[in-house]
Image (cartoon, rainbow, N blue to C red):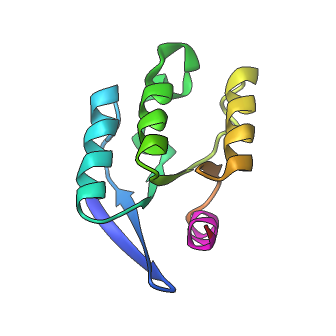
Amino acid sequence: MKIEIHNINDIKIAEVISELSIINKVEDGLNLLGDLYYQGFDKIIIHEKDISPDFFDLKSGIAGEILQKFSTYRVRLAIVGDFSKYTSKSLNDFMFESNKTRHIIFVSNCSEAIKILAAI
């Protein structure tokens, strides 16, 4: 796992880059949050390909637990990927509502994530 730092107008954004899945269970997400928060990051980008598909099954509870912690610690998160393969209405509604609040966002590319995170 590698952290690429994007500096935009004195705002530090951590992009997590990995060849392996980095979030497979709740603890993985919480550890990532803690590690990056400790390093001074409050804006983080992760890629959908690096997250277990279970995260995107809202019934599993993984997304809810992890994203609640990001909200509690006021760490903004962008998840970048192609979400068209997820057909669950509840997941699509969840992503839509998340994107409206802009605390947790689901976007298709990294440049869009950086643009949004740098503006909030």
Residue 48 in percent (x, y) is at 50, 43
Residue 106 in percent (x, y) is at 62, 47
Residue 44 picture quarter: bottom left
Q: Residue at x 74, y 48 (%)?
A: 100
Question: How many labels were placed on the picture?
Answer: 0
- Pick out the residue farthest to the bottom: 9
Compared with 44, 72 (above or below) is: above
Q: Residue at x 31, y 37 (%)?
A: 30
Q: Residue at x 35, y 64 (%)?
A: 41
Residue 10 in percent (x, y) is at 45, 84
- Residue 85 lies left or right of residue 13; in this view the side is right
Q: Which residues are magenta?
A: 111-119
Residue 95 in percent (x, y) is at 68, 38
Q: Can residue 25 be seen here?
A: no
Compared with 1, 3 (above or below) is: below
Compared with 36, 23 (above or below) is: above
* Main secondary-structure element of the magenta-colored stretch: helix
Please tell me whether residue 38 belongs to the stretch shown in magenta.
no
Please tell me whether residue 114 belongs to the stretch shown in magenta.
yes
- Residue 52 lies left or right of residue 110; in this view the side is left
Q: Residue at x 56, y 64 (%)?
A: 110
Residue 16 picture quarter: bottom left
- Where, quadrant-wise, is the C terminus in this rendering? bottom right
- Where, quadrant-wise, is the N terminus in this rendering? bottom left
Compared with 26, 76 (above or below) is: below
Q: Can residue 96 be seen here?
A: yes
